[in-house]
Every structure is written in C-alpha cells, then in structure tokens.
Image (cartoon, helix red, strand yellow):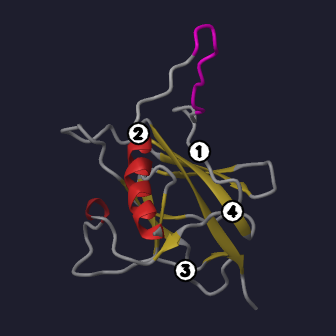
Amino acid sequence: MSVPRRVLLVPVLLLAGCTGPAAVPAGAPATVPATTPATEPAGPAACAERLETGRLPDWADAGFTGDTRVRHVFGARGGIVAILFAYPLVHARGDGASNKILWVARPEPGRSEPAQRTPLVITATLDGAGTPVVRRVEGGPGPSIVDLPAAGCWRLRLDWSGRTDTMDLVYRPASG
C-alpha cells in the first residue's frame, strides 16, 4: 500500500518545484540577494591553494604537447592560471632552483584582438600578516620567477590589462 503513495508523492513534489515565485505583499520590502562587488574578486576565507595536476584547458596549453599534465593553480575567477614549474614553491631556496611560474591569462570573451599588454602586478599578502609585497612581471602574464619574503600561505591579487583575479599559493620553508 505504501508504494502507490510514493508514486503519487513524486509528481506532487515535482509540481511544487515548478510553481512561480511567491507574490510579495504590497508594502513589504523586497529581498535582494547579496552579491560580491564586480570590482573586487571574492577570495577564500582561509588558505585555499587549489593545486591541480590534470591537463591544462585549451586556452592555456600553448607550447605543451600531447597529454601534458603539469601542476597549476587557477585564479578564483578563472581568468588566469599559474603553471608551477617549481614545486613545491620554497622560500629562500638553497638548492640552486628557482620558483618559476608561467602565468597564462584566459582570453577575454568577445574580443577579436588581444588587450593592450601591461605588466602583471602581483600584490601578495602573507596569511595573518597585513603588509603586502608587490612583484611585477613586465610584459604581462608570462614566464616569471616569484620569490616571496617568508614561508606560508600567500594571498595573491593579480592585476593585468585592466583585469583582476586572486589566488592562494603556499611557499614552504627551505629544508636543511
């Protein structure tokens, strides 16, 4: 006997989800959903280095062949990707290697020609510290070596060609 009730309950629930918006009584305040201002990218509340090791998207794989898998971190808005040739990133490396990062910006939709190239300005703030440091990649997103003054989680604000994105990168202490 309980099976037919379940069968009848499903269409009722589906129809309930298809009804239009509820009417707002006259004089009642309308609810406005909260939004993030378009001028400031939303950033994660805690350190959120979103390291991936899969394939790069088509817009970021120029110069790579086949099924290349490389460590990378996307900006929070998806407008830029940091391809990490050195991993882990290390503060005060003593091994002769460098913290090489290739920055690739996603093409802007609807643009038939590239935007004017301006330097990529990286404003980095150590998690829990208030004093930011600034690094510049001349010529805009591209190859770089980005050394930061301490180990820890760094929140990066990335500005280039009138665009902005954010990401977190972790720099580990040098071993030894």
> What x and y, as percent, mark residue 29?
64, 15
> What x and y, as percent, mark residue 72?
46, 70
Q: Secondary structure at mark 1?
A: loop
Circles 4 and 1: CB distance less than 8 Å?
A: no
- 30 falls in the magenta region: yes
Residue indicated by mark 4: 47
Question: Can the viewer see residue 143 in this picture?
Answer: no
Circles 2 and 1: CB distance less than 8 Å?
A: no
Count every numbered label the image shows and give the total.
4
Question: Type of residue at label 4?
Answer: Cys
Circles 3 and 4: CB distance less than 8 Å?
A: no
- 89 falls in the magenta region: no
Q: Judge depth for marks 2 and 1 and give the one in front.
A: 1
Cα distance, mark 4 to mark 1? 13 Å
> What x and y, as percent, mark residue 41?
55, 42
Which residue is at the far bottom? 176
Circles 3 and 2: CB distance less than 8 Å?
A: no
Question: Type of residue at label 1?
Answer: Ala
Cα distance, mark 2 to mark 4? 26 Å
Q: Judge depth for marks 3 and 1 and give the one in front.
A: 1
Q: Secondary structure at mark 3?
A: loop
Cα distance, mark 2 to mark 1? 19 Å
Name the residue: 42% across, 48% down.
Answer: 12
> What x and y, as percent, mark residue 6?
44, 63
Specify the segment rendered in magenta: 25-34
